[in-house]
Image (cartoon, rainbow, N blue to C red):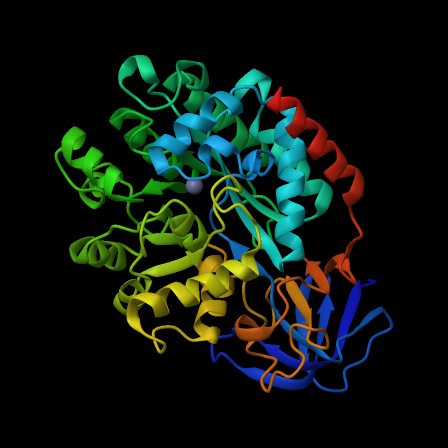
């Protein structure tokens, strides 16, 4: 039987994020059939070789929260300086004009941006389906670029006429939401090790769907063995809404409706209190921390130090490109580190811990212990960072990537396949993708 092999040779440093968090120097990684086959020195192959001299090698970064479609509505003037609810009300009418092509092209652009920042596995939260758009459009984009993808079938069902935030044109009937969730799970979800596509269920937030839909979504997810995702406790308005409408805090609301457990992860959680942190730790519920978005929308500083100390599983997310407005996951990891230092002092989070959150932390939150670390038998999702460039020139510790290193990857491998080589895509034509993205964004402005 012939195997497909790739050898990464002579890396200056490998930050493995394995169980012992080993840091190796002058080492090689041999990949066979998409899996890490051997790590050591002086390894050889008859297959492809990637020279990693002058480079730091890390696991591919994992993005646990995004709305890829928003890459087409970055820096929209009316939303640049608004708080969350006002920001949403500015953007909803624009998003209502999207269709399948806007969803596909914006997803491809967003995925490409993530890949160049070292991301190999991303989730996506698509909660509006205007004009015939489907989750399938984003899955096609991920397949075309070759990234590992966890799309979630999001939803909104309470429109303005029912006291909700989104316009009625963007909400769906709850029966249709559940039926389409079943369709996309049955069509695309792969539960196996090494899966390239896993589907989750993700009502947009407690303020855009009913209590019944939250409960039914949890029942359906458990029945199908897929994960659950939503936005939770994002800012003070969010907490006030929960207290007023549901008579309880978001943690209680989540627990009552079956929205805690190792198969659940919540975005933001900026405003979780001590009891809620305890609940999430006990129930092994995951968090997608989105520091740039939280800064951009003035939501606050999520208590990540307290969460990690309590044993809460934490991953990192860039959040949608309309509230970041970039999608650079490496820069996001640096922001996570800086924000905890603002809140708790310079020793609150090390570069290594922030990178761990961005790699194995995110993989664990997404239920992917087969990803996010470089050790034998794990998937060969690998980011290679050139530390001979201007970013690292003069650095005494190039492996401290989040202090000085590059935020754009040199090479990127997903399942052992090289999708970025010398910072250029092998799988897609990026210039024509960006040209179409600009054309469609301009058309939405008129
Ligand atoms: Zn979000």
Q: Residue at x 60, y 24 (%)?
A: 445
Which quadrant of the rendered structure holds the C terminus? Answer: top right
Which quadrant of the rendered structure holds the N terminus? Answer: bottom right
Residue 227, by quadrant, is top left
Q: Is residue 411 left or right of residue 183?
A: right
Above/below status of 73 relative to 61? above
Above/below status of 327 relative to 307? above
Residue 83 % position (x, y): 35, 38
Residue 53, by quadrant, is bottom right
Does the image show residue 347? yes
Residue 152 % position (x, y): 49, 37
Above/below status of 172 relative to 152? above
Identify which residue, 412 or 385, lies in the foreground: 385
Farthest left residue in view: 247
Does the image show residue 226? no
Residue 421, by quadrant, is bottom right
Residue 61 % position (x, y): 56, 60
Q: Residue at x 61, y 23 (%)?
A: 444
Identify which residue, 87 or 203, lies in the foreground: 87
Q: Residue at x 53, y 45 (%)?
A: 325
Identify which residue, 295 or 412, lies in the foreground: 295
Residue 271 % position (x, y): 25, 50
């Amino acid at each position: 039987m012939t195997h497909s092999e790739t050898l990464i040779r002579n890396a200056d440093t490998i930050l493995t994020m394995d169980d012992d968090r080993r840091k190796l120097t002058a080492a090689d990684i041999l990949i066979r059939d998409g899996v890490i086959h051997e790590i050591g020195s002086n390894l050889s192959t008859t297959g492809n070789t990637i020279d990693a001299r002058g480079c730091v090698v890390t696991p591919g970064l994992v993005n646990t929260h995004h709305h890829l479609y928003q890459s087409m509505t970055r820096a929209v003037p009316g939303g640049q300086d608004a708080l969350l609810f006002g920001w949403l009300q500015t953007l909803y009418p624009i998003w209502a004009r999207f269709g399948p092509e806007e969803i596909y092209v914006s997803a491809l652009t967003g995925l490409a941006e993530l890949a160049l920042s070292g991301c190999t596995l991303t989730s996506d939260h698509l909660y509006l389906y205007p004009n015939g758009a489907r989750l399938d459009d984003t899955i096609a984009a991920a397949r075309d670029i070759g990234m590992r993808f966890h799309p979630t079938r999001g939803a909104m069902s309470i429109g303005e006429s029912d006291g909700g935030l989104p316009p009625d044109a963007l909400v769906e009937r709850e029966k249709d939401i559940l039926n389409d969730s079943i369709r996309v799970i049955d069509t695309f979800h792969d539960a196996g090790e090494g899966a390239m596509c896993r589907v989750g269920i993700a009502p947009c937030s407690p303020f855009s769907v009913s209590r019944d839909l939250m409960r039914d979504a949890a029942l359906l997810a458990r029945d199908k063995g897929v994960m659950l995702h939503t936005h939770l406790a994002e800012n003070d308005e969010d907490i006030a809404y929960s207290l007023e409408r549901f008579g309880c805090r978001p943690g209680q609301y989540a627990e009552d409706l079956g929205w805690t457990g190792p198969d659940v992860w919540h975005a933001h959680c900026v405003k979780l209190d001590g009891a809620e942190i305890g609940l999430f730790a006990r129930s092994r519920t995951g968090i997608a921390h989105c520091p740039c978005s939280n800064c951009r929308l003035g939501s606050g500083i999520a208590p990540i130090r307290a969460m990690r100390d309590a044993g809460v599983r934490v991953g990192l997310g860039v959040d949608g490109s309309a509230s970041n407005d970039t999608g650079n996951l490496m820069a996001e990891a640096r922001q996570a580190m800086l924000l905890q230092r603002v809140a708790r002092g310079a020793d609150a989070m090390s570069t290594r811990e922030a990178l761990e959150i961005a790699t194995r932390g995110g993989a664990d939150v997404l239920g992917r212990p087969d990803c996010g670390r470089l050790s034998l038998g794990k998937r060969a999702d690998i980011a290679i960072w050139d530390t001979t460039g201007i970013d690292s020139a003069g650095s005494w510790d190039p492996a401290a990537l989040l202090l000085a290193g590059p935020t754009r990857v040199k090479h990127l491998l997903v399942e052992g396949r090289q999708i970025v080589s010398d910072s250029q895509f092998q799988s897609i034509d990026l210039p024509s993708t960006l040209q179409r993205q600009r054309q469609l964004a301009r058309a939405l402005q008129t």
